[in-house]
Image (cartoon, helix red, strand yellow):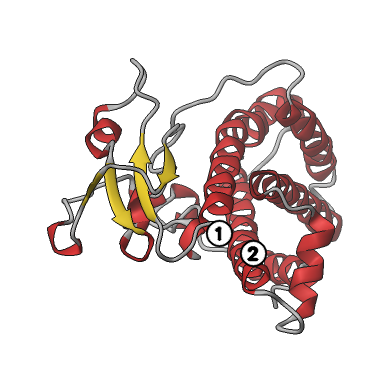
Amino acid sequence: MAKVEVKENSKTREQFLLIVDAFRRMLYNVENSAERLEVFDDIITLRASFLIDSVLDGLRIDFDRAMELFQAKNLHLTERDESERDTLMAAFDNLVDFAVAQEVAMMQELPEELDLAEMESYEAICRKYNETYAETENAQVLHAGAIAAFWIGLSAESLITYNTQNDERVRELHQSFDGLTYPKSQFPPELIPPIEWACRCYLTADGYGSVMDSILKPQIKVNPIFAESLATGGRIFTNAHPYFRHTLPPEVEAIKQRIKTKLWLR
């Protein structure tokens, strides 16, 4: 994972401080399984809410508007409303799954027998997942949301071009896609940014790039974590992400379903 530097007074730092406070409470209640699970629920809920905030910022939609779209079903919704709702539902569903998997992965790094004298080392694990990794993940989600917002606003007839920042930081793989243009209906989802960690690429519409026929699509091999795109209703993070290799205990699966129900996803 390409890391984004965490600034001292960043939003992610503020989010981490809320999570680490709950993390400490969870470890201090290690002998009380019910209390420990309740606090773990709080940690997952916090992380999910921070990821959701990031995608809402990218989409330029506030939470109240998202809930309004979810509850409206198909009543009095415009075509754009429906597109926004479907995108939001795909994002929220994936990000809740991701938050749950992330915190379970964090817990897997803790020893089975905890020694509270080692709290500092345990907090370092919490920091790794909920600040260091989270800074990069939040930026990735924000970018995916911004690209999806752009995509929603395009007509079906639009020609869409892949663009890099054209500077010395552009990776060779990304540069190889620069200028590729497809009709919106044929644009490969795996080529919709971000295609890797810390990808800075973007899309433009109705440009003058070379239009690729669908039969002549190049072999596109991107990071499988980003093989789908929120813009086309896919996941921001696929199951190729290593967080998802852990099986969820039944009680954690119940936490996930509770959060999704609260968000009108179930």
Q: Is residue 33 visible?
A: no
User: Circle 1 sits in a helix, a strand or a loop, which is it?
Assistant: helix
Percent x, y for residue 206?
39, 49
Label 1 and label 2: CA atoms lie apart by 7 Å
Q: Amino acid at mark 2?
A: Glu
Residue occupying the point 66% across, 42% down? 113
Drawn side of residue 152 relative to residue 39, left or right: left
Drawn side of residue 1 relative to residue 115, left or right: left
Asked if the residues shown at circle 1 and circle 2 are in contact, with their CB atoms under 8 angstroms apart, the answer is yes
Mark positioned earlier in the residue sequence (1 or 2)? 2
Residue occupying the point 69% across, 73% down? 265
Drawn side of residue 113 relative to residue 144, left or right: right
Does 242 sit above or below residue 176?
below
Looking at the image, which residue sits at the far left? Answer: 216
Is 136 or 187 nearer to us in this picture? 187
Is 102 or 148 nearer to us in this picture? 148
Tell me the quarter of the image containing the C terminus: bottom right
**Residue for badge 2:** 84
**Residue for badge 1:** 152
Is 141 or 28 nearer to us in this picture? 141
Looking at the image, which residue sits at the far bottom? Answer: 75
Crowd tier of the residue under label 2, counting other residues whose Cα lies within 10 Å: few below 14, some 14–19, many 20 or above: many
Percent x, y for residue 102?
59, 48
Residue occupying the point 59% across, 63% down? 87
When asked about the image quadrant of residue 162, the answer is top left
Drawn side of residue 264 relative to residue 149, left or right: right
Q: Is residue 44 visible?
A: yes
Does 81 sit above or below residue 164?
below
Percent x, y for residue 40?
76, 52
Q: Amino acid at mark 1?
A: Ile
Residue occupying the point 56% across, 57% down? 153
Tell me the quarter of the image containing the N terminus: top left
